[in-house]
Image (cartoon, grey):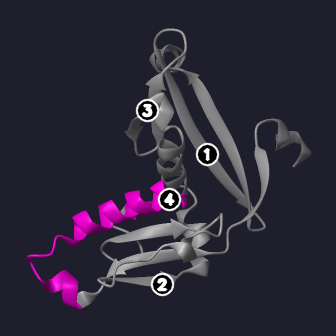
Amino acid sequence: MEFLKWILEITDISIKNVYTIVSIPEEASDPKNDMSGRLLVLSYLIAYRGTPCFHEQFSKISNESVIVFDIYNQFGEFNVPCVFEVKMEPKLVSEVIDGPLMNSLILYNLHKMKYCDPSYFASFLVYPSNFSGLDYFSIIPAIKNDILALRYIKDRISNFIEVLVQ
């Protein structure tokens, strides 16, 4: 593990509090309720308030849910509307490390980096650089013994495109 420290930021964050938010069945069955849109807006609200989360339309848990990674222990302060049900999913961490955790960290950083005027994509951000052109930003998470490690990738978009073309 010593070898990897130069490319990974080993945090002291333990990922044990993973939640899913799903629609209450009675609410979801009413065609007037756009539960998909409500879940999407809810995911942005939670991320905006400082808790990484991601809206998944086709999750392993249910047809549609918001997966919340309470790595900063702030989710308890958020009042979830009564049309949703919150479930704790401690065994979910190993299943969602590759997609939803990375996407939730990108969404979380979208709100932290709003001063840079970023463009949001599910797995990366693009924003104007200090010089000219665009910069690319992404995060690759890794978990070892429930401890989060992060690899930050930041580069000029022209360098990124050159690698793709070669």
Nearest to N terminus: mark 2 or mark 3: 2
Chain part drawn in magenta: 26-55
Q: Nearer the viewer, residue 74 or 125?
A: 74
C-alpha gap between disc 4 and disc 2: 20 Å
Q: Which mark is residue 87?
A: 2
Residue 101: name its quadrant. bottom right
Report the mark closest to the observer, 4 or 2.
Answer: 4
Q: Secondary structure at mark 2?
A: strand
Q: Residue flagged by tag 2: what amino acid is it?
A: Lys
Q: Nearer the viewer, residue 150 or 33?
A: 33
Residue 31 painted magenta: yes
Residue 63 drawn at (x, y percent): 30, 74
Q: Residue flagged by tag 1: what amino acid is it?
A: Ile
- Classed neighbour count for the residue bearing mark 2: other residues with Cα under 10 Å, few (<14), some (14–19), many (≥20): few
Residue 108 drawn at (x, y percent): 51, 51
Q: Residue flagged by tag 4: what amino acid is it?
A: Arg
Residue at the location (31% across, 67% down)? 39
Q: Which residue is denoted by mark 3 in the rendering? A: 118
C-alpha gap between disc 1 and disc 4: 22 Å
Report the mark closest to the observer, 1 or 2.
Answer: 2
C-alpha gap between disc 3 and disc 4: 18 Å
Nearest to N terminus: mark 3 or mark 4: 4
Residue 10 drawn at (x, y percent): 79, 50
- Considering every residue shown, the one lying at the far right of the view is 2
Report the mark closest to the observer, 1 or 4.
Answer: 4
93 to 153, vertically: above or below: below
C-alpha gap between disc 1 and disc 3: 18 Å
